[in-house]
Image (cartoon, rainbow, N blue to C red):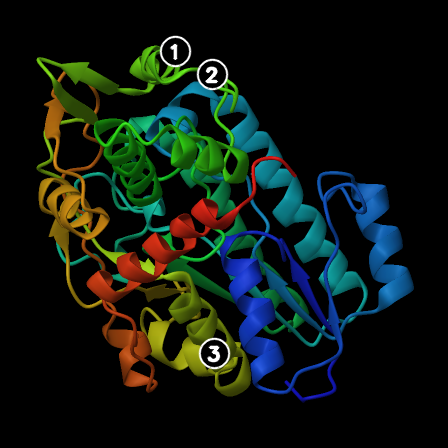
Amino acid sequence: MKIDSKIYIAGHNGLVGRALMKILKLKGYHNLIGKTHDELDLTNAQAVREFFKKEQPEIVFLAAAKVGGISANNTYRAEFIYENLMIQSNVIHQSYKHGVKKLLFLGSTCIYPKHSPQPIKEENLLTGSLEYSNEPYAIAKIAGIKMCEAYNLQYGTNFLAVMPTNLYGPGDNFDLEKSHVLPALMRKMYLGKLLEEKDLESLRRHLKFLPISGLNINMSLDNMRTALEQYGIKLINGKVNVEIWGSGKPLRQFLYSEDMADACIFLMENIDFEDLVKEFKVDNSTEEIRNTHLNIGSCDEISIKDLAYMVKDIIGFNGKLYFNTSKMDGTLKKTTDNSRIKKYGWTPKVGLTEGIQRLSEEMNCALSINISN
């Protein structure tokens, strides 16, 4: 990958795509392409074909995907498998057809079996059944990995696949129904803090910055409080209570999005598919090559309960946390083994506490917005 390479970031406005844009620019890459969904629908095969024919990118970061938390994955099962299969199939195939020199596909650690040995190694893929709640999404991502491998082996392409752990960072999705666990926790507790402080002005500014369905900035404090009850933010016996789905027992790793982008760029600059073949070849006496993807994660894991209390302290929420055990926990433990990428010389830089503090500052930006604008 050269400084003047023509680089297409699919999903450039998403969590990882935005971080990729930022870090690529900081490193001096300047020939970057990004298209919004309105400009290019990646589920549309003809549109994707025409885009590649016109732009002829040399490098592709495939960070575009339909993503969401446990509730969204379980509710919109058809959309999650269909849209992700279409996006990745169109982009990967057209990258091959138009001679893209190198592509990196972003998957997810939910590809691994629900009861995988811990820590999860790349070779654990397809060794057991998946977590039910996000099975359609996981199957789509597995297909993307295998598509990259198949094109590499048959056509000699140089397509890499990486499996990040739970990601968070600047520009995250704070939607209370569709976001992942960390931004959802932060949003709930931030709103809980403003409610307990009866800070109507700050609530209005916050809602202008990050709107919530069913609420508007002209509501009274009492009406806002009532509307937020459907999202698990409730006033009980004079104390604001924040509901958290599940028991809080599941253990997770969290990776800052800019660390993820840094890892992706590191791989694209230094590692080729042939390098991975040497590491992932099943048996030197056979021609079987599989599981050439790489895990990318943080070094530590934390329970959802401990994470919630960490967020509570950083946000400054003084209310109560309620763990609703009638809701799904998901996989109780999915710690990934990151030894392979570490062997190549990459490790994360931003710790969880620092990352949450940075993200908290982003949410605080809402308080500087003039609601009359």
Circle 2 sits on which residue? Answer: 219
Identify the amino acid type marked 3: Leu
- Give the residue drawn at x 11%, y 24%: 322
Q: Nearer the viewer, residue 143 or 170?
A: 170
Identify the amino acid type marked 1: Asn
Quadrant in the rendering for residue 24:
bottom right
Q: Position of residue 331 (x, y in %)?
A: 20, 37
The answer to whether 290 appears left or right of 245 in the picture is right
Secondary structure of the residue carrying tag 2 is: loop
Q: Position of residue 155 (x, y in %)?
A: 67, 68
Question: Which circle, 3 or 2, is nearer the viewer?
Answer: 2
Secondary structure of the residue carrying tag 1 is: helix
- Give the residue drawn at x 23%, y 68%: 351
Are the residues tagged 1 and 2 within 8 Å (C-beta)? yes
Q: Which mark is residue 267?
A: 3
Marks 3 and 1, how far apart at CA: 50 Å
Circle 1 sits on which residue? Answer: 223
Q: Nearer the viewer, residue 326 or 149?
A: 326
Marks 1 and 2, how far apart at CA: 6 Å
Marks 3 and 2, how far apart at CA: 49 Å
- Give the residue drawn at x 28%, y 80%: 342
